[in-house]
Amino acid sequence: MTHPIRIGVGLQPQHADYSTIRNAVVRAEEIGVDAVFNWDHFFPLMGDPDGKHFECWTMLGSWAEVTERVEFGALVTCNSYRNPELLADMARTVDHASDGRLIFGIGSGWFEKDYDEYGYDFGTPGSRLAELKAALPRIKNRWELLNPAPTRDIPVLIGGGGERKTLRYTAEYADIWHGFGNADVIRHKNQVLDKHCADIGRDPSDIERSADAKASTPEMGDELVEAGATLITLGFDGQTDYDLTPVTEWVAWRDERNAG
């Protein structure tokens, strides 16, 4: 399977009023991006640690109604915060509200303040990964049981770069893998993921590869594409008032690359 280059925008839901976030989602769709993401935290990760912040999944329900074309989702949902069956039902509902545009992003969780402040057991990296491993088949099974069923096979995105476990779960369960790091890191992780796919007999081209772009110009995009990524996401938050000006250039770069 050949994946076209796609551009995503990460709208980090921190340091802004909700109306500002909602307007940024609409603006991103108007610019022509392929996907829009938030994240699943309860407090800001940068800037004032107690600054303005909003919850992930109720926000996605809003995005389903204010957009018409873009795919969207969390980059990524923390598996620890919700029962897997409930999470599957939430995703199915947002899938229907958006007429089939949800990307179901999930990871094992890592931000200790979220856990402590909201009363979740932080555990260890190993225990959180074990919980993710157990949750993934439960989520997919619940999708098969729900009435009505999801409008499509909801694409599952797994975020994280752990080579022994996270990428192994990605090979088995995901449609998209999202990695963090520069082009060399993404290239190496893609090779590890390809090996996991080979080990379980899955075609590695079935999995779309995704990465953050840490630069304001598309030259970084060329490097990431050469490293195997085709979904490239640029992040913005309320500290910059969601200034999406650079995205226009990235969308033009995407169109030129896909046309070539």
Image: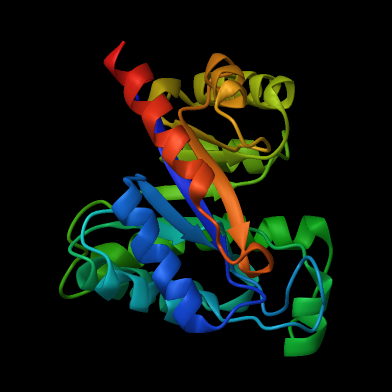
At 60% across and 51% down in the image, what residue appears?
235
Residue 121 in view? no
Front residue of this view, candidates 83 and 14: 14
At 68% across and 23% down in the image, what residue appears?
183
Q: Position of residue 161 (x, y in %)?
A: 70, 39
At 44% across and 77% down in the image, what residue appears?
59
Q: Quadrant of residue 16?
A: bottom right
The vertical placement of 113 against 104, above or below, is below
Q: Judge left or right: residue 203 versus residue 211.
A: left
Q: Judge left or right: residue 84 versus residue 97.
A: right
Q: Quadrant of residue 58?
A: bottom left
The vertical placement of 248 against 107, above or below, is above
Front residue of this view, candidates 198 and 212: 212
Residue 8 in view? yes
The vertical placement of 148 against 199, above or below, is below
Which residue reaches farthest top?
260
At 62% across and 18% down in the image, what residue appears?
191
Front residue of this view, candidates 176 and 199: 176
Q: Quadrant of the C terminus?
A: top left
Q: Judge left or right: residue 100 versus residue 138.
A: left
Q: Position of residue 257 (x, y in %)?
A: 38, 18
Q: Quadrant of residue 220?
A: top right
